[in-house]
Image (cartoon, coloured by chain):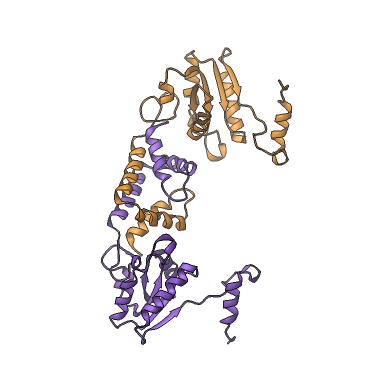
Chain colours: A orange, B purple
Amino acid sequence: MSRLLQDAVSEFAKLPGIGRRTALRLAMHLLKMDTDAVEQMTDTLARYRREIRHCESCNNLSDSELCPICADEERDHSTICVVEQVGDLMSIENTRQYRGLYHVLGGVISPMQGIGPSDLKIDMLVEKVAAGKVKEVILAISTSVEGETTLFYIMNRLKQFPSVKVTNIARGIGFGDELEYVDELTITHALHNRREVE
Amino acid sequence: MSRLLQDAVSEFAKLPGIGRRTALRLAMHLLKMDTDAVEQMTDTLARYRREIRHCESCNNLSDSELCPICADEERDHSTICVVEQVGDLMSIENTRQYRGLYHVLGGVISPMQGIGPSDLKIDMLVEKVAAGKVKEVILAISTSVEGETTLFYIMNRLKQFPSVKVTNIARGIGFGDELEYVDELTITHALHNRREVE
């Protein structure tokens, strides 16, 4: 087998969720693309890895010191939504319903994986809140055991700022979910937090 | 959203079977890799696309004029196994049971997709057989309608060389296949080509 092809397959197979069979299919696909298009792809990916940085205010991925969200003066700088990772931020941005800022933790506390509070951008969040301009911190962290641990840890750290409102995104039955298949914990939450129909 | 990230996601999403969600996951994964490892990946892929070529004898992917198989004097140069594509060649090589050479057609005849005999490396095969050293041509082409058309076309072209044996790989029940789920055509073939137990 061609060494060039073998090497290409090995590189593709380093990516998560891509086995050798898929890697071979991707390598074959590159041959159907123009050489220029492949160069553009590889240059773009290398440049992305080399030049991407984290926003110095919120830890979002950014092309410059401040990400476009933190740099946007029209957004509400007194509200911070705390998320685990950049993908979560994007999901919220896609709703176009939120006009505040974000804070990306970079993960959740997980003793099993050796991730403690100091491995996450929690101090950075506390410092930002300590600066005094923040009125509300919305916690949008997953409901896993690790997520709940992280949530309580952050809530404890923020207790020193009694004037700052700390909220948690609502848990309940998702739109389109069939009750029959929803887990008991979610149904319990949804019942408990029921609202009067207006 | 960061332009660098957006561009990286768009490039990944150009690959077959990779949607925007997977592309984002892959882009995030690149950040977990060392910059050097990413450069090595992108350099390898770009070099592969730029430098890979087709074997001038069998149309297999190759690093040089002749692929390692055609260049191997220890292999049986009088037997040619005709396959549709490089992936098929690899599957046969993986069995380590075949010691002859190959010929990669580059597809099958498909009027629906505008692929005629001249779009495939059939003339190249006929010329190789005409050179007089080939004793057997094994056709290992898929059993689709297009595959069968291609098979009959090649058989017709090779009729001018009566001394060359043309064979077709056996069709039958695969190892591990449950008879209950095998299609009728395959069962019919398997019954028809039954062999006495030795």
> Is residue A156 rendered to the left or right of residue B156?
right
Residue situated in front as seen by the camera: B183 or A107? B183
Q: Is residue B91 above or below residue B155?
A: above
Which quadrant does the N terminus of chain A fall into? Answer: bottom left
Q: Is residue A192 above or below residue B40?
A: above
Residue B95 seen anywhere in this rendered image of the structure: no
Image coordinates of residue A111 in percent, x first then y, are 56, 37
Q: Residue at x 47, y 19 (%)?
A: A75
Res. B94 image quadrant: bottom left
Which quadrant does the C terminus of chain A fall into? Answer: top right
Residue A180 seen anywhere in this rendered image of the structure: yes
Residue situated in front as seen by the camera: A81 or A31? A31
Image coordinates of residue B115 in percent, x first then y, are 39, 63
> Is residue B118 rendered to the left or right of residue A197?
left
Image coordinates of residue B100 in percent, x first then y, are 37, 77
Image coordinates of residue B157 in percent, x first then y, are 36, 78
Q: Residue at x 29, y 48 (%)?
A: A36
Q: Residue at x 33, y 39 (%)?
A: A47
Q: How many marks?
A: 0
Q: Residue at x 42, y 77 (%)?
A: B138
Res. B81 image quadrant: bottom left
Looking at the image, the residue that sits furthest to the left is: B65
> Is residue A29 rendered to the left or right of residue B188?
left
Q: Is residue B34 above or below residue A85?
A: below
> Is residue B67 rendered to the left or right of residue A103?
left
Q: Is residue B127 above or below residue A28?
A: below
